[in-house]
Image: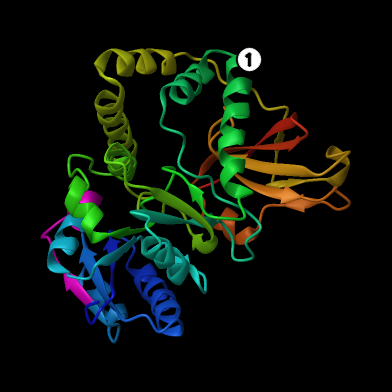
Amino acid sequence: MSAASVDVVLVHYRTPHLVRPASEALLADLNGAGIPARLWLVDNGSQAADRVGWLGLPLERLEPGGNVGYAAALTLAVRASSAPRLVVVNPDVLVRPGCLPRLLAQLDAGAAAAGPRFVWDEAGRFLLPPTEARALPAELIAAAASRGPRWAWLARRRWRRHARLHWQAVAPLASRSLSGALLAFRRDAWERVGPFDAAYRLYFEESDWLERLRRAGLPSVYEPGAAALHLYAQSSLGEPAAAGWFAESAARFRQRRYGPRFAALLARLERASFCADAVATLDRPALAADRLPGSAHWIEVASSPLGFPAAAEPRAPMSRDWQLPAAVWDRLAPGSYWLRAVASGRELGPWRVEKRA
């Protein structure tokens, strides 16, 4: 192995205050395991005053000259680096102890790429969802969810099976539903299938790349023993173009993955106007125990009235009131959020709660 057995790449955009805590968590994890590494920062946009807070960090900064997008920024760092193993991470991700060693162990065991379990809060109560399944049946049912309550329920049921397969895993799981927010991969796999497609300005670039791994017969692995706190979407919160980038990337991915006719069908299905009504509107993200009778529940929080994808907390039988962690609520963008409780396939809710600006 080279002097640096892994190169870690942070792609930064408009989150200068997150660079130091993310870097310090990475360094603590690597140093604690005795893993030699180089840290690279691809700076898609910062001011001189922002960089004062990075002084003293062992970061090798690359400046592409503007916001070139996530995929192009990563490619720039991969070309500048030399280690046989790489990790790409967003500054809004804080790795937990043992996260990187476990991911790198999966690469050493033969995986081309590996991703962790993401939690939403510091206590690890809430699990963030894996990337949605990118296959014809799953995409079709997900797109049809907007056509009526029955379709929406079927889509949530299918999505829950996919999410809980990952959430309840106790051993590494073959999966393509990994997130570019934190992804470890081997350089030889990158060289074999090529870089992330820079035409994806944001979103879907990792799904496209992982699909190319699959077609090349290269395995990707979800490692539930590797955990990371994801502060979630901090770069895109203040970016008005983010929704447009998502739509463009989704259309590009679908055309490439399924062909133009099926991509057009999915777009038509999603234009339907059904929107699930909330049972009640809450003044804060909390539920009284008497609303949740019976057995153990999963409490789900979604930004879509359709209810998926969602973060979820597994709960024992409800003997006390439930409340979303305050730190999570404070980080969320203004807007509406929908809560559901699910036990033995039975849904309670939804309840809508509004986050004020």
How many other residues sit within 10 Å of disc 1, few (<14), some (14-19) or many (≥20)? few
Residue 105, position as x, y percentages in the image: 43, 67
Residue 115 is inside the magenta segment: no
Is residue 338 rendered to the left or right of residue 207? right
Q: As rendered, which of 64 and 240 lies closer to the eye?
A: 64
| Res 276 seen here | no
Q: Which residue is drawn at 28% across and 62% down?
A: 12
In the rendered structure, which segment of residues is drawn in magenta?
A: 60-73
Q: Residue at x 49, y 16 (%)?
A: 144
Find numbered disc 1 in the image and state the secondary structure of the residue it sits on: helix
Q: Residue furthest bottom?
A: 56
Q: As rendered, which of 8 and 328 lies closer to the eye?
A: 8
Up the image or down, 189 lies above or below 157; here it is: below
Residue 103, position as x, y percentages in the image: 43, 63
Residue 71 is inside the magenta segment: yes
* Quadrant housing residue 14: bottom left
For the rendered model, the colour scheme is rainbow
Is residue 183 rendered to the left or right of residue 228? left
Q: As rendered, which of 106 and 160 lies closer to the eye?
A: 106
Up the image or down, 94 lies above or below 74; here it is: below
The residue carrying mark 1 is 150
Q: In which quarter of the image is the N terminus?
A: bottom left
Q: Which residue is drawn at 52% across and 56% down?
A: 117
Is residue 270 rendered to the left or right of residue 201? right
Q: As rendered, which of 300 and 66 lies closer to the eye?
A: 300
Q: How many marks?
A: 1
| Res 79 seen here | yes
Residue 270, position as x, y percentages in the image: 43, 18
Q: Residue furthest left?
A: 65
Up the image or down, 109 lies above or below 49; here it is: above
User: Which amino acid lies under the numbered mark 1 shown in the image of this protein?
Assistant: Arg
Q: Which residue is drawn at 41% across and 22% down?
A: 136
